[in-house]
């Protein structure tokens, strides 16, 4: 079983490994059933999904008939204005076969022009606030990809104090970038003080696909060996209070969950630098 920690100030104790349902984007119903069995086996109690994850919401919907109370359910919206955000969210509720979610997040809030629209009059943020007031969601959050994510998140959190969670990339190679590491440290310090949950992605990224055919359902080439995955998972979970969202291919899911269930002493910098060399790892953000 995988350990749990308070998910920020929500009062929910989430498994430190959160199921990233992007891996269900192209999954069949039978494959999705196998994924559910795996989640139950490891005690996963938190699901992250989004309307842009292909068939994911449709695959999760049937699970909710019997297991809604077992999962903290999070989805996202990526529309900038209130009407489109509202319509997208209600479509998600229908696909998920629920009447509310636990966390509703603004998807990839990492560029200034979009943020000004979203947080301005008639923007999507107005819908998030309304959805929380009407108990269509219990909590609200922001997510981000790329090197600008921690810097943008900190600005956004200071501008609007009601966000309950953030999501950003974090892995060993990214944190060797001094500027990125400094900005992550700053947002983590702020989130710790404010009791805002911090979720991470890209834990097992190996490098860009480049000219290689994409043999996994991830936009980056992932690590695929159990020992390498374990080191990267243990490195991320060695940070107190961080949550790790599983990668976007369900063939990697069991190895990630096994690693999270066996969490111990985090690997050393030498262990990780040796892994970078042996696996030919490169940062996926430049």
Image (cartoon, helix red, strand yellow):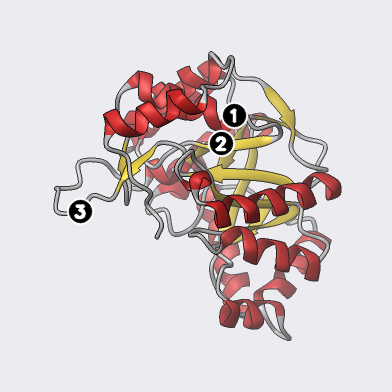
Q: How would you rate the neighbour count of disc 2 (Cα within 10 Å): few for under 14, some for 14-19, many for 20 or more?
A: many
Q: What label sits on residue 39 in the rendered view?
A: none
Closer-to-camera residue (228/140): 228
Q: What label sits on residue 237 in the rendered view?
A: 1
Q: What label sits on residue 210 in the rendered view?
A: 3
Circle 2 — which element? strand
N-term mark: 1 or 2:
1
Q: CA distance from mark 1 to mark 3?
A: 29 Å
Tag 1–tag 2 contact (CB < 8 Å): yes
- Residue placed under numbered mark 2 in the picture: 244
Q: CA distance from mark 2 to mark 3?
A: 26 Å
Circle 3 — which element? loop
Q: What is the x, y in percent for residue 123? A: 67, 80
Q: What is the x, y in percent for residue 274? A: 36, 27
Can the viewer see residue 100 in this picture?
Answer: no
Q: Residue at x 39, y 34 (%)?
A: 32
Q: How would you rate the neighbour count of disc 3 (Cα within 10 Å): few for under 14, some for 14-19, many for 20 or more?
A: few
Q: Which quarter of the figure has residue 228? A: top left
């Amino acid at each position: 079983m995988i350990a749990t920690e308070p998910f920020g100030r929500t009062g929910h104790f989430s498994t430190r490994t959160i199921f990233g349902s992007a891996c269900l984007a192209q999954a069949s119903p039978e494959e999705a059933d196998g994924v559910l069995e795996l989640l139950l086996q490891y005690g996963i109690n938190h699901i992250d999904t989004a309307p842009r994850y292909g068939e994911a919401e449709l695959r999760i919907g049937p699970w909710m008939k019997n297991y809604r109370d077992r999962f903290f359910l999070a989805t996202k919206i990526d529309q900038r204005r209130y009407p489109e955000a509202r319509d997208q969210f209600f479509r998600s509720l229908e696909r998920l076969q629920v009447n509310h979610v636990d966390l509703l997040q603004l998807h990839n809030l990492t560029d200034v022009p979009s943020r000004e629209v979203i947080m301005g009059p008639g923007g999507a943020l107005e819908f998030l606030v309304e959805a929380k007031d009407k108990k269509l969601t219990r909590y609200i959050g922001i997510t981000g990809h790329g090197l600008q994510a921690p810097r943008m998140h900190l600005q956004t959190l200071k501008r609007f104090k009601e966000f309950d969670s953030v999501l950003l990339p974090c892995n060993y190679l990214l944190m060797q970038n001094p500027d990125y590491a400094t900005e992550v440290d700053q947002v983590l310090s702020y989130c710790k003080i404010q009791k805002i949950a911090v979720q991470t992605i890209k834990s097992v990224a190996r490098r860009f696909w480049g000219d290689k055919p994409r043999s996994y359902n991830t936009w980056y080439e992932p690590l695929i060996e159990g020992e390498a995955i374990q080191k990267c998972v243990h490195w991320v979970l060695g940070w107190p209070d961080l949550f790790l969202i599983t990668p976007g291919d369900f063939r990697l899911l069991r190895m990630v969950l096994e690693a999270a269930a066996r969490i111990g002493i985090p690997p050393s910098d030498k262990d990780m630098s040796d892994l970078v060399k042996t696996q030919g790892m490169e940062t996926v953000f430049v």
